[in-house]
């Protein structure tokens, strides 16, 4: 709801099409305001934090493409997405990353009373991330935590647990595209108004993985830092040249 009591539909936000998928032109404050409106409804809303690797995967994965196309808020999470928008002559305001959204939501949890659920990462990591956030933002409320290494057979129990937690925001940290597909498959049974896929965010918030130094972030080299720290990230980085090629071809 807005202050005048009228709901602002998500499509009231401007978006820029990149490789056939929309990315909303939001800064952090506009994204948080939109999430706040979602929280004040009872319907589930899917928030996607878009990066170049996700958009390349979506070209060959129809179901992922469909899920992103129907998401309620798609924020620009990477330097690659910002570069593409500029290249199309429709620059986006700023990078609005999953890590920063989650941290800001923890800050707002204390002031606005949001109840947050962390789902994903290795056993113990979601607990550590919640503890760090509680220490940094006293009063932040966690509805629950659960790791991301569960079997298909355990899915129902986890869905029930989340529904019973009455969370306002569910942060799903399984990596792309598993988290987007899990949200899409379970969204209507979770009873949570905001569902957001956040990749490696819990590893960062728990302190187990350090973000790139600011100088590298500003030089748009965060991807290089991630590969140096975790060579398994190479697969994801190898999608970048393909992204550049696809964008150049479509301008
Ligand atoms: N993960 C998980 N369950 C799995 C596989 C991975 O919870 O079955 C977690 C993993 O521990 C990590 C996150 O998913 O915390 C993926 O992080 P990554 O940085 O690779 O995400 P992306 O680059 O796709 O955003």
Image (cartoon, helix red, strand yellow):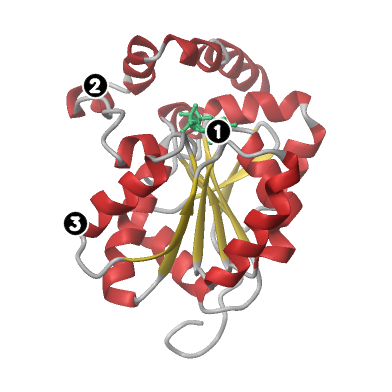
Q: In the picture shown, does residue 25 fall above or below 62?
A: below
The residue shown at (58%, 15%) is 239
Q: Secondary structure at mark 3?
A: helix
Residue 113 placed where, x, y %?
35, 76
Q: Nearer the viewer, mark 1 or mark 3?
A: 3
- Name which of mark 2 and mark 1 comes first in the sequence: 1
Residue marked by disc 3 = 135
Which labelled disc corresponds to residue 216?
2
- Does the image show residue 118? no
Q: Is the CB–ligand 1 distance for label 1 below 8 Å?
A: yes
Q: Classify residue 138 as left or right of residue 234.
A: left
The residue shown at (45%, 71%) is 36
Distance from the alpha carbon under mark 1 to that under mark 3: 26 Å
Residue 73 placed where, x, y %?
56, 55
Distance from the alpha carbon under mark 2 to that under mark 3: 27 Å
Label 2: few (<14), some or many (≥20) within 10 Å?
some
- Name which of mark 2 and mark 3 comes first in the sequence: 3
Q: Secondary structure at mark 2?
A: helix
Residue marked by disc 1 = 175
Label 3: few (<14), some or many (≥20) within 10 Å?
few
Is residue 41 or residue 146 the one in the foreground?
A: 146
- Does the image show residue 162? yes
């Amino acid at each position: 709801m807005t202050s005048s009591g009228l709901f602002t539909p998500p499509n009231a936000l401007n978006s820029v099409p990149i490789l056939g998928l929309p990315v909303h032109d939001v800064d952090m404050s506009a994204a948080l305001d939109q999430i706040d409106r979602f929280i004040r409804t009872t319907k589930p809303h899917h928030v996607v934090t878009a990066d170049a690797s996700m958009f390349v995967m979506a070209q060959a994965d129809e179901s992922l493409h469909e899920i992103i196309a129907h998401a309620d808020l798609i924020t620009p999470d990477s330097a690659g997405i910002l570069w593409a928008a500029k290249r199309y002559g429709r620059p986006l305001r700023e990078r609005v990353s999953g890590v920063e959204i989650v941290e800001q939501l923890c800050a707002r949890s204390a002031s606005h009373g949001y109840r947050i659920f962390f789902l994903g990462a290795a056993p113990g990591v979601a607990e550590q991330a919640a503890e760090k956030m509680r220490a940094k933002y006293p009063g932040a409320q966690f509805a629950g935590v659960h790791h991301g290494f569960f079997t298909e057979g355990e899915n129902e129990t986890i869905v029930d647990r989340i529904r019973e937690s009455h969370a306002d925001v569910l942060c799903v940290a399984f990596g792309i595209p598993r988290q987007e597909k899990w949200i899409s498959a379970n969204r209507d049974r979770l009873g949570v108004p905001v569902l957001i896929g956040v990749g490696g965010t819990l590893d960062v918030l728990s302190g187990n993985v350090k973000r790139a130094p600011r100088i590298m972030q500003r030089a748009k080299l965060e991807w290089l830092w991630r590969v140096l720290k975790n060579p398994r990230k190479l697969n994801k980085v190898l999608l970048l040249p393909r992204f550049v090629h696809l964008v150049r071809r479509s301008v």
